[in-house]
Amino acid sequence: MRCLHVVPALAPEAGGPTTAAIALVQALRNRGLEAEIATTEAPPALPIPVFSFPVSRWTLRQYAFAPALATWLQENIPRYDLVHLHGCFAHSSTVAAAIARRHRIPYLWRTLDHLSGPSLAKGRWYKHLYLRTVDAANLRSAVFHCTSEPEAQWVKGWAGDRPVLTIPLGVDPIPAAPDACHTLRQRWGLPIDTPIVLFLSRLHPKKQPEILLQALAGLDRPWVALMAGTGDPAYLKRLVSLSQNRGLGDRVKFLGFVQGEAKTEVLRGSDVFALPSQSENFGLAVAEAMAAGLPVLVTPGVQIAPEIERAGAGLVIPPTVEAWRVALETLLADPHQRQSLGQNGQMLVQQTYQWGAIADRLVTVYRQLLSPS
């Protein structure tokens, strides 16, 4: 079975969606599928077949307008049995859906939270116009792939009578790093008993890192926050200014984008993971933190929050500074609770978010879509 995954961009700085797309295709290939990616701005030396094309510099970057990619899709989609789209409001998804539809090739559409109420509220007029005009016919022929049940409920409002499937993402195993607690603190000149709060995500207003910083500023106990991620330089400057104005000084470290051994070290060496995001269709960084044994603090907007709460893997906190201050105070004061929540999170990942099992579910869906009946 030949399956083409169409991803707007594979730049590592894009975070979870990029990581998930690569891991998903690798898992499908491990199951014997001839799965490949067509995209823009892919890094070199990926472990899977990727066809990457440049983005036009004369259009909105988030739309990822790539004429050469469109030409390639026109010529090559007919060679595939099935197409799997990643993301809405992207040139690649719109073009690939139209071509697949014209050639009667079935396609799944992973919406990446783009059809949720909070997401559509930003740029409401043009997003609704785009969906009702440019992508109207494409939506009417898609099978939708959501990664959480709350996301699926949003998508059903746009799907009409089309199928909406809920299949979560997986998590790659986090390498062991038995000395990470020591080496991470040594790297930043911290006492060995200083609790570390980790924010590992894009620095974007949607992620609401200001809530975390202001909540931490209200604590009387020792702590250090590692802010691992990239973002718009102007927004990063605002966060640095906020940190300085609240007198947080050297207790907040802005690490930039981390990957490889550096990412393993912050995951294995921190004490608490925090993501006060307004909305996450899944929350891959949250799942990675649980895989590393960290207790997680999230908002109800993180769509796997119900699973976290049921498993006792973390705390689900309303997105207010005071609520987050209290939750952080509670966890930082109780290492036994942190350990218990972290162990529960690891169990949740092992039972629910394994790429092999998720690939098996997708292969079953692919075969059903290709079945003559």
Image: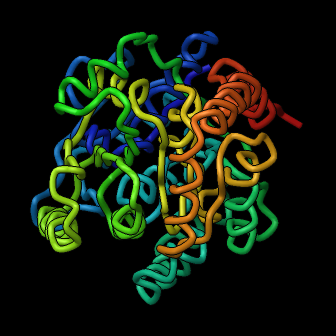
Image coords of residue 301 (percent x, y):
60, 65
Q: Nearer the viewer, residue 186 or 278?
A: 186
Relative height, residue 288 to residue 334 (above, below)? above
Give the position of the C terminus as an image quadrant: top right
Q: Residue furthest bottom?
A: 125
**Which residue lies at the image location 81% right of the left edge and 33% below the top edge?**
368
Give the position of the N terminus as an image quadrant: top right
Horizontal side of 229 relative to 209 (left or right) equals left
Image coords of residue 291 (percent x, y):
57, 27
Q: Nearer the viewer, residue 134 or 296?
A: 296
Horizontal side of 230 relative to 331 (left or right) equals left
Relative height, residue 122 to residue 266 (above, below)? below
**Which residue lies at the image location 65% right of the left edge and 26% below the top edge?**
346
Image coords of residue 47 (percent x, y):
36, 15
Residue 38, quarter of the rendered image: top left
**Which residue lies at the image location 68% right of the left edge and 72% below the top edge?**
158
Snapshot colouring:
rainbow
Q: Nearer the viewer, residue 54 or 238?
A: 238
Q: Residue furthest front?
A: 220
Count of marks placed on residues: 0
Say if residue 205 shows up in the picture. yes
Image coords of residue 305 (percent x, y):
68, 54
Horizontal side of 312 relative to 349 (left or right) equals right
Horizontal side of 199 relative to 68 (left or right) equals right
Residue 17, quarter of the rendered image: top left
Say if residue 14 shows up in the picture. no
